Image (cartoon, grey):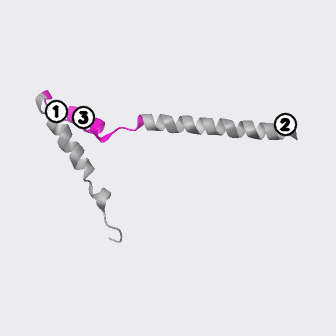
């Protein structure tokens, strides 16, 4: 009986640790809107002198996306 309880406790501990590790890894993979805008600017071959303005405009555009302020019921 003690072996079953110890095994269950160990299995629960391992699952908690692995779930936490996966969540941390997933958070590290998530890109910010600024990172995505910089990548898009590089893809669009925006010149270095216009890069800051492009990224600022892109981030602002994503910040006021329609899905962020959609009224309920419509």
- Calculate the distance from the C-alpha at mark 3 to the C-alpha at mark 1: 8 Å
Q: Percent from the top left, x then y, of residue 4? A: 83, 40
User: Residue at 29% of width from left, 60% of height from top?
Assistant: 69
Q: CA distance from mark 3 to mark 2?
A: 55 Å
Q: Position of residue 8 (x, y in %)?
A: 76, 41
The residue under the point 49% across, 34% down is 25
Q: Is 45 contained in the magenta span? A: yes
Which is nearer the N-term, disc 2 or disc 1?
2
Over which residues does the magenta segment extend? 29-48
Circles 3 and 1 in contact, beta carbons < 8 Å:
yes
Residue indicated by mark 1: 51
Residue at numbered disc 2: 3
Task: Residue 50: give x, y in percent of width and height.
Answer: 12, 33
Find out whether residue 47 is within the magenta segment.
yes
Dot 3 falls on a residue whose secondary structure is helix
Magenta segment, prevailing SS (helix, strand or loop):
helix
Tag 2 and tag 1, C-beta contact below 8 Å: no
Residue at label 3? Answer: 38
């Amino acid at each position: 009986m003690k072996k079953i309880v110890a095994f269950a406790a160990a299995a629960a501990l391992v699952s908690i640790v692995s779930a936490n590790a996966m969540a941390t890894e997933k958070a590290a993979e998530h890109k910010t809107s600024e990172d995505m805008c910089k990548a898009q600017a590089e893809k669009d071959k925006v010149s270095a002198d216009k890069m800051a303005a492009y990224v600022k405009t892109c981030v602002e555009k994503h910040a006021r996306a329609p899905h962020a302020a959609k009224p309920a019921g419509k």
